[in-house]
Amino acid sequence: MTSTTSEHSGLKVRGVSKRFGATQALHSVDLDVRPGECVALLGENGAGKSTVSKIIAGDFPSDTGEMWWNGQPYAPSAPADALEAGIGLIHQEMRLLPDLSISENVFVGRQLMSGGRIDRKEMDRRAYEQIRRLGLDVSPRRLVGSLKVAAQQQVEIAKALTLNARLLILDEPTAALGEEETEHLFTQVDALRKEGVSFIYVSHRLEEIARICDRIVVLRDGQHVASHDTAQVPVTQLVEDMVGRSIESVFPDADPPGDREVITVQGLTATDGFFKDISFTVREGEILGIAGIVGAGRTELVRAVAGADPVASGTVHVNGRQLRSGAVTDAIQAGVVLVPEDRKAQGVVLDMTIGDNVALANLDRIAGPGGFISPRRVREVALDACRIMQVKGRTEQHAGTLSGGNQQKVVIAKWLERRPKVVILDEPTRGIDVGARAAIYDVIVNLAKQGMAVIVVSSELEEVLGLSHRVLVLARGEQKGILDRGEATDVAVMHLAAA
C-alpha cells in the first residue's frame, strides 16, 4: 500500500455483533481492509468468519456495530445493495444452477442486453474469457451440472470476477481446486489488486496465506483474538491462535500394517478413459494414499473401486471375492464403503436428521420383522455411531446445521455401523478447519488400527504423506508408481505426478 491512500478508503467494520437464537456468533468484531489489500480471515469452523463475510455482503444485518465503505456509512439490506456498492462474495457453498449453462450462471440475474434481447453471444464471450483465465477451457454453453466439482468452483469464481467489484470476499475459493487451478486464481487476484481491488480471503489452507495475503486477522468463538501485520507467520502460531492451544503433531502415528491383503485391484480401466490399467493392493491395517493433480483420475478410480461406476476392464477382489463392475450394493455387501468427495451433495442428506442419515445406510440392519423400522432402534444406532465418532450434535438435529467437520463424521459414522473391511475417503478434510482435521486424522488412523484397509484421496500432499503407509501416484489417468513411506517425499510424489 502507498502512503497516499486516504484513511477513509476501503472498508471499516466496527463493533459488529450477531446472535442466532441462543448462539452468539459474533462479539464486537472490528476489521479494516484497504484498497488493493488482501486480508486473511482465519478461524476454526464456527469462529464467525462466514458470519462476518455475510454481514459485509448484505446476506443479513448485524445486531450491533457500524460499517463504512470508502468513507461513507455502509449498511446493505440485501446482497444486491452490496453488489451495487461494489462488494461481492464467493460463497463456500456453491450457488450455481446445474441446469443452466456456464455463461447463464455467470450472468444470472444480470443478463447482458442488446436491442431489447438477451445478448447470448456477448455473455458467452465474456464468460469464456474469464473461465479461460482461471484455467478452464470448456464451452461456455456447457451445462454446469455436467462439470466436476473443481470446474464448478472455477465457474463460481468467474461469476464473481465479472462483477467489477472493488472488494471481493473469497470464502474457501480453492477448496475444490488443484495446484494449477489455484495458481491461475492467484494470478487473477494479483492482477486485480494492482488495479486497487481489495480482498478478504477465508481459507483453511494456511500455506496459501503467505502467498496471497498482506495481513491476517484471526477469529475464535466469534471474537477477534489476534492480528498480524504480515502474512509471513509460522503455521504453528496461526494454529495456536485459531484453536487456543498448541498442536504438537497434526498427524497421529499409525501402526505397521498386517500381511493379509484385503483388497486387490488388477488392471482397472475406466469406460470413459479417465484412468487405465491401475493395479494395487491394500493390506489389513494399511492406509494407501492416492496422489495426483486435479484431472489425474483419482476420484474416478475410487468410485469405480467402490462400485459407483462401471469399468471397461479389470477386477476388484475383496478377501478373494470378485466384485461385480458398477454394482454398489455388491461392493457394500462385500464390505467396501466410500466417503465421497462432495459430502453435502453425496454424503449426507442435509434436510434429514443425523439419526435418519445414519439409518439410511443401514436399513437392512435396523429393520425388524416385516421390514418395520422402529424410531427407537434408529435412535439407538445413531447414538452409538455418533458416540464412536464423537459427533457434536443431537441425533434429532438436521445434518445441514452441523459444521463441515461434524458432517464428515456423520458420513463416516453411517458406514462404520456396517463394520466395513475397506474404507475409501475422497478428500476427507475438504473445507474443514485445522482442529476438526486433527479429529478426522485420528479417525482415519484408528480405522487402520482396527484392521480395516483404508484408501485416502487428497489434493493436499501433506495430508497424503502424513497419513499413508504407501502412496499411489496418478498422472493423467496413468499409474506412475507406488512409493513406500520412506521414499514418499513431496519432491518424489510431484516428480511422478508431473511425469
Image: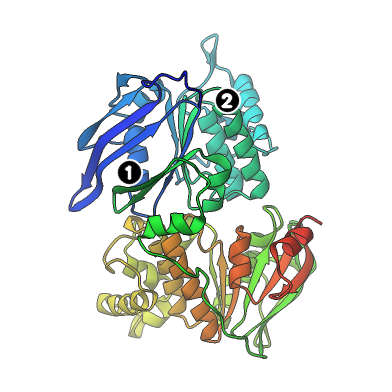
Vertical position of residue 473 compared to residue 257: above or below: above
Residue 304 seen from this side? no
Dot 2 lies on which element? helix
The three-letter code of the residue at mark 2 reads Lys
Q: What's the colour scheme?
A: rainbow
Q: Residue at x 75, y 64 (%)?
A: 492
Vertical position of residue 430 compared to residue 384: above or below: above
The image shows residue 133 at horizontal and vertical percentages of: 66, 33
Which residue in the rendered view is the most extreme toward the front?
3
Q: Residue at x 69, y 70 (%)?
A: 471
Specify the quadrant that holds the C terminus: bottom right
Q: Report the mark closest to the observer, 2 or 1.
A: 2
Vertical position of residue 492 compared to residue 157: above or below: below
Label 2: few (<14), some or many (≥20) within 10 Å? few
Residue picked out by circle 1: 51
The answer to the question of whether label 2 and label 1 lie on touching residues, with beta carbons closer than 8 A, is: no
> In which quadrant of the rendered view does residue 50 lie?
top left
Left or right? Give the position of 222 relative to 126.
Answer: left
Q: Nearer the viewer, residue 270 or 476?
A: 476
> In which quadrant of the rendered view does residue 63 lie?
top left
In whole angstroms, how far apart are the C-alphas of marks 2 and 1? Answer: 28 Å
Dot 1 lies on which element? helix
- Looking at marks 2 and 1 on the same chain, the residue that comes earlier in the sequence is marked by 1
Q: Which of 410 and 439 is in front in this view?
A: 439
The image shows residue 248 at horizontal and vertical percentages of: 47, 69
Label 1: few (<14), some or many (≥20) within 10 Å? many
The image shows residue 187 at horizontal and vertical percentages of: 63, 35
The three-letter code of the residue at mark 1 reads Thr
Q: Which residue is drawn at 52% across and 64% down?
A: 428
The image shows residue 153 at horizontal and vertical percentages of: 55, 43
Residue picked out by circle 2: 194
Residue 158 seen from this side? yes
